[in-house]
Image (cartoon, coloured by chain):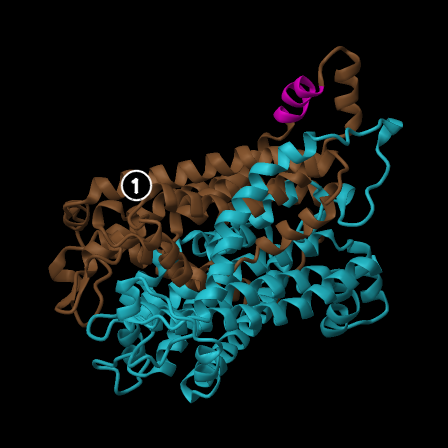
């Protein structure tokens, strides 16, 4: 692309292919949003209708279910709780791993690495038995605790990388200037960790926000359920309310889409920085 | 981890050590699991109780909420717990009965084979198509690259539960777009085609969903990795008269080997445990014909109330996963040593 050349068929094919791929990847997302805005009589047609007058009826139906605000509150509580806990606990652990030498450090690093691959989806039955025997079915604190441990290994792993990237000399300089080790951490390292804290908490948010298997089995009581189960509520043996399902899915996806687009811009920034320096 | 939680997995390490862009999970250079390099200034590090105090909450949390359920899982698998025992809270010891029952059951082996086939097909498709799209991204002009990467990000960001619902709607028997597409393309028999008629066809729909949702991770990382391969290397390869295929195998692949290893590894784990996609799509049906191991364990446990048996299934699943993982761990460790 450095010099101007006449249009070649290969380049045209390349761009057409890319355009087609873009359409394929975006179509399900587009179809979700457009179906959510479709009037009922144009939704259930044998041939899909592409042009229609948008309506908010589906959103009204989706948010009009009895427990809607309970689902929202539960999801927000559980997600935010798990993320904050993970950040706090991981910050301490990753600082120790990145900056201190102690017996069992290697073992801990290996454990964290392995724990990242924990087969949570496989352990639901054991979790169910434990929760039942401990009278903790339909418990939001237990769900929060599980999500916290789900995202903990990744949070430790990532923050450890970020802390290790901060030169020790910065910390030492602060200590020479009269800071205690704790103050040096708070005033020097912590501010430099902002991007790390941001991306790990976003990752945690997405994991907890999406979790389906645990809440499906542990919290059968609607008052203790979260939004992922709400999405499946408009399906029944008598038929599916696709309009409401698509509206619910759209509402559920919007926060993640927004977060992601924001995150992606940062990631691309990191990529280009890497390319320039590399 | 769920497939869509991949977002930060890539971006975070890319932010930190810029050189490792495209290599998620690669440990930061300063503190590999190997010997700790000497710190600047030769300052002595505290060796008292402080590090233990700092890691204690994390260790405690992992022990109570991860290790304990894992152990409980093994214990359950050695007990004979069905509906009655469950209600009476009596858990009679059964020895290896659950395991012998499973290993002698063709139904179990069918699910194992299906799980492997599903994982293999998905990971192969994800890696091949994802890499190709990554290469394409690298060859596109600025504008087209933005268009394609935005589309990839949209698919990547879709929460799994939401995307399962969308795919159910796209493939709906009566009003789904896919039937219309097939009719419009001139195929017959798609008036009211039931895409989830058989276990295999359900698995195909799940595969399309998983591949669609997973390609962006591989493609965008592949592209990020490619930008770190120096342009002069391509130039040199071109001077030597290498074609695209040779350039890939001689230049791109060796340079990005860690990326391929780690990404394949992560995809194997994610796909093997794809509970949400399979269960929310058709509950493992029709007639239990689309169950993979985690779904099989769930259905046996919850719907059939065979808790001990379900626990045995999950233990065997974990064992299989560990075997596959250890094979990969060795590859990755070897890779680390080579560098």
Tell me the residue at 59%/71% (across/down): B128
Chain identifier for the cyan-coloured part of the image: B
Q: Residues within 10 Å of mark 1 (few under 14, many from 20)?
A: some
Q: Inspect the magenta stretch and tell me whether residue A202 lies in it.
A: no
- The residue segment tinted magenta is A181-191
Expressed as whole percent of the image width and height from the top left, the position of residue A202 reads 49, 41
Q: In the visual, does A234 lie left or right of B35?
A: left
Q: Which residue is mark 1?
A: A74
Tell me the residue at 47%/65% (across/down): B75
Question: At numbered mark 1, what does the secondary structure look like: helix, strand or loop?
Answer: helix
Q: Quadrant of the C terminus of chain A?
A: top right
Tell me the residue at 16%/69% (across/down): A237
Q: In the visual, does B15 lie left or right of B102?
A: right
Q: Against A14, is B38 above or below?
A: above
Expressed as whole percent of the image width and height from the top left, the position of residue B106 reads 43, 89
Q: In the visual, does A273 lie left or right of A148?
A: right
Q: Inspect the magenta stretch and tell me whether residue A190 lies in it.
A: yes
Q: Who is closer to the viewer here, B55 or B30? A: B55
Expressed as whole percent of the image width and height from the top left, the position of residue B184 reads 29, 77
Q: Who is closer to the viewer here, A64 or B216? A: A64
Q: Against A269, is B328 above or below?
A: below
Q: Who is closer to the viewer here, A182 or B116? A: A182
Tell me the residue at 19%/74% (across/down): B174
Q: Against B157, is B135 above or below?
A: below
Q: Chain A hue?
A: brown
Q: Main secondary structure of the magenta part?
A: helix
């Amino acid at each position: 692309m450095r010099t101007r050349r006449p249009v070649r068929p290969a380049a045209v094919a390349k761009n057409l292919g890319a355009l087609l791929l873009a359409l394929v990847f975006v179509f399900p997302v587009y179809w979700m949003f457009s179906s959510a805005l479709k009037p009922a009589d144009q939704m259930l047609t044998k041939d899909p209708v592409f042009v229609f007058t948008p309506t908010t009826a589906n959103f009204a139906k989706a948010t009009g279910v009895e427990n809607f605000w309970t689902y929202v509150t539960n999801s927000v509580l559980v997600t935010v709780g798990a993320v904050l806990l993970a950040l706090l606990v991981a910050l301490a652990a990753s600082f120790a791993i990145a900056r201190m030498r102690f017996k069992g450090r290697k073992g801990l690093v290996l454990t964290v690495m392995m724990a990242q691959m924990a087969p949570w989806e496989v352990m639901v039955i054991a979790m169910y038995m434990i929760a039942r025997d401990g009278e903790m079915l339909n418990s939001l604190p237990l769900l929060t605790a599980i999500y916290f441990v789900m995202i903990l290994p990744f949070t430790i792993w990532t923050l450890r990388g970020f802390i290790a990237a901060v030169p020790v000399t910065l910390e030492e300089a602060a200590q020479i200037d009269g800071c205690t080790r704790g103050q040096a951490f708070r005033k020097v390292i912590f501010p430099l960790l902002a991007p790390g804290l941001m991306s790990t908490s976003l990752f945690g948010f997405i994991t907890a926000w999406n979790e389906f298997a645990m809440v499906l089995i542990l919290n059968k009581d609607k008052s203790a359920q979260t939004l992922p189960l709400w999405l499946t509520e408009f399906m029944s043996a008598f038929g599916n309310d696709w309009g409401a399902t698509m509206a619910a899915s759209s509402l559920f996806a919007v926060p993640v889409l927004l977060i992601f687009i924001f995150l992606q811009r940062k990631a691309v920034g990191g990529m280009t920085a890497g390319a320039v320096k590399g | 981890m769920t497939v869509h939680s991949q977002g930060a997995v890539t971006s975070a390490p890319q932010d930190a050590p810029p050189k490792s862009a495209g290599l998620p999970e690669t440990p930061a250079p300063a503190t590999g699991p190997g010997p700790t390099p000497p710190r600047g200034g030769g300052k002595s590090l505290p060796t008292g109780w402080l590090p233990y105090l700092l890691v204690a909450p994390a260790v405690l949390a992992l022990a109570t909420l991860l290790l304990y359920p894992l152990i409980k899982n093994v214990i359950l698998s050695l007990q004979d717990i069905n509906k009655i025992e469950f209600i009476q809270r009596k858990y009679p010891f059964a020895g290896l009965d659950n395991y012998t029952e499973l290993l002698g059951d063709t139904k179990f082996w069918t699910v194992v084979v299906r799980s492997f086939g599903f994982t293999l097909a998905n990971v192969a498709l994800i890696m091949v198509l994802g890499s190709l799209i990554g290469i394409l991204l690298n060859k596109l002009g600025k504008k087209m690259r933005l268009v394609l990467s935005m589309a990839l990000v949209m698919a990547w960001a879709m929460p799994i539960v939401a995307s399962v619902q969308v795919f159910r709607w796209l493939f709906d028997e009566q009003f789904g777009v896919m039937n219309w597409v097939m009719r419009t393309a001139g195929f017959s028999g798609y008036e009211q085609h039931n895409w989830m008629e058989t276990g295999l066809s359900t698995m195909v729909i799940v595969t399309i969903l998983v591949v669609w949702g997973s390609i962006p991770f591989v493609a965008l990382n592949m592209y990020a990795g490619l930008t770190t391969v120096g342009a002069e290397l391509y130039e040199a390869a071109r001077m030597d008269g290498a074609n695209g295929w040779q350039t890939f195998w001689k230049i791109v692949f060796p340079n990005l080997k860690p990326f391929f290893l780690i990404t394949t590894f992560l995809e194997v784990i994610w796909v093997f445990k794809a509970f949400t996609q399979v269960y929310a799509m058709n509950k493992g049906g029709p007639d239990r014909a689309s169950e993979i191991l985690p779904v099989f364990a769930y259905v046996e446990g919850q719907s059939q109330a065979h808790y001990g048996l379900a626990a045995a299934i999950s233990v065997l699943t974990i064992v299989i996963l560990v075997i596959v993982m250890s094979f990969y761990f060795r590859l990755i460790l070897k890779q680390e040593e080579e560098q």
